Amino acid sequence: MFRVAGIAADITERKRAEEALRKSERVLREAESLGHTGSWEHDLVTGEIFNTARTCASFSATTAAKGASFEELHSSHTSRDREFCDAGATRSFSPKGPARH
């Protein structure tokens, strides 16, 4: 006697979500390229930073790789850029939340 067990799952929604994410990332890269801007992420749990190459160039930073610490990135900025970043971080972590303009 043979038994066959299996699970069938519809992954259509997951595939749609993955494609939407890829499209969104592609549009962001294009916008950053056309606008000569960059982006960055700071994982508040791990402390890791990720910067696009354009962001590093804009802030005179040398660390573009994921996994750089905030301190490494901060120390690679010019003193003027460090002051700007410090002020932004202070506003962002304020009990009132980031300032709205």
Image: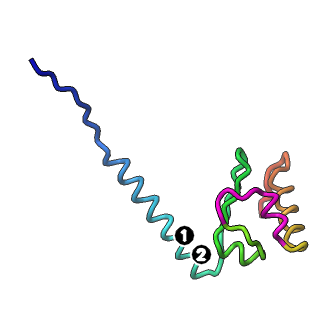
Local packing at callout 2 (Cα closer than 10 Å; few below 14, some 14-19, many 20+) is: some
Determine if the magenta segment contains residue 54: no
Report how far apart the C-alphas of labels 2 and 1 lie in the structure: 6 Å
Whether pointer 2 and pointer 1 mark residues with C-beta atoms closer than 8 Å, the reply is yes
Residue 81: which numbered mark, if any? none
Point 36% across, 54% down: residue? 16
Q: Position of residue 53 (x, y in %)?
A: 65, 73
Instruction: Name the side, left or right, on which 26 lies relative to 65.
Output: left
Is residue 27 depicted above or below 41 in this figure?
A: below
Coordinates of residue 30 in the picture (x, y in percent): 52, 76
The residue at which mark 1 appears reads as 28
Against 19, residue 11 (above or below) is above
The residue at 83%/71% (across/down) is 77
Point out the stretch of residues depicted in magenta: 65-77
Residue 91: x percent and y percent?
Answer: 84, 56
Q: Circle 1 — which element?
A: helix
Is 67 placed left or right of 80 in the picture?
left
Task: Give the residue pinned by disc 2.
Answer: 32
| Quarter of the image where the C terminus is located | bottom right
Q: Against 13, is 2 above or below?
A: above
Q: Residue furthest front?
A: 1
* Residue 26 or residue 92, whichever sits in front: 26
Question: At 17% across and 26% down in the image, what residue appears?
Answer: 4
Q: Amino acid at mark 1?
A: Leu
